[in-house]
Amino acid sequence: MKRLLLCAVALVVAFAVSANEPQTNEVVVNGYAERVVTPNKFTLAITINESDSKGRMSLDEQERTMTKALKSAGFDTDEALRFKDNYSAYHRRGAYATRSYELVVFGAEDLARAFETLESLNLHSVSLKSATCTDIDTIREELRREAIRDAKRNAEVLAEAIDQSIGRCTYIHDYNSNGEVVFNTAMKIRGVASIGYDAVVEEAAPEPMEFAGSKISHTIQAKFELK
């Protein structure tokens, strides 16, 4: 009996304390931010084949010619040009040695100049392998900040509508993950459509190429004290 009495007293005290504590009202809002980003780093896939020169130039000579042309066009081949593979391609008349490379360039102007330079050499194939944005992590951080500021503005608008104000933020939920941003690498080079790795350059690109941007967004849910 004594134990039951003590439990009852404890419950009464707990309810009394809870009743005297100030109740916090909150407003729950979402914040949103978006940005269209464009690629600034491009990787070209280059293939040379000894059959293309009909025996007049070896692969070593083609490689030296290509490297020299790229250097003359202003590219640091020691950094930008990478050897990828050496293999044999089979044709009806036999097997021909083939080499593949990757050239990394930055900016649409350099991309156009690289295509123009490589096309003039009549190489086996040149294609756009990938397009990326090197600033994507910085942009994502900026979007997070913009999204939480947007949430705060939304909370202020709602609070003002009922003649109240907001206090401190008590909760933030970040909805987004840092998924890969995929850019559409389809483009036209003087009317010649080229898409992805299978694109073969047939004509030079005299002007900087334009790429459609990719939209990335960020959503945040937040709670603010309502005064």
Image (cartoon, rainbow, N blue to C red):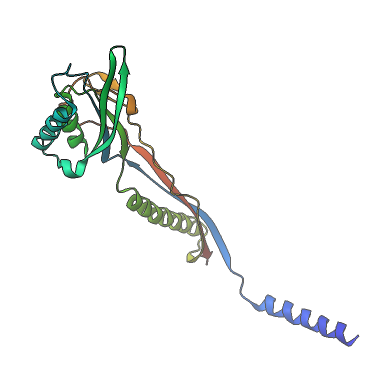
Q: Is residue 105 visible?
A: no
Query: Which quadrant, please, contains the N terminus?
Result: bottom right
The extreme right residue here reads: 1
Left/right placement of residue 33 relative to residue 18 reads left
Quadrant of res 193: top left
The extreme bottom residue here reads: 2
What residue appears at the point 82 percent right and 85 percent down from the top-left corner?
Answer: 6
Percent coordinates x, y for residue 139 in the rendering: 34, 50
Quadrant of res 70: top left
- Which of these two is toward me, 124 or 190? 124
In this picture, is 61 found above or below 215? above
Percent coordinates x, y for residue 32 in the rendering: 44, 49
In this picture, is 173 found above or below 61? below
Percent coordinates x, y for residue 99 in the rendering: 25, 30
Quadrant of res 80: top left
What residue appears at the point 21 percent right and 36 percent down from the top-left corner?
Answer: 108
Q: Is residue 98 visible?
A: yes
The extreme top residue here reads: 92
The extreme left residue here reads: 72
Percent coordinates x, y for residue 119 in the rendering: 17, 24
In this picture, is 33 found above or below 22? above
- Which of these two is toward me, 139 or 39? 39
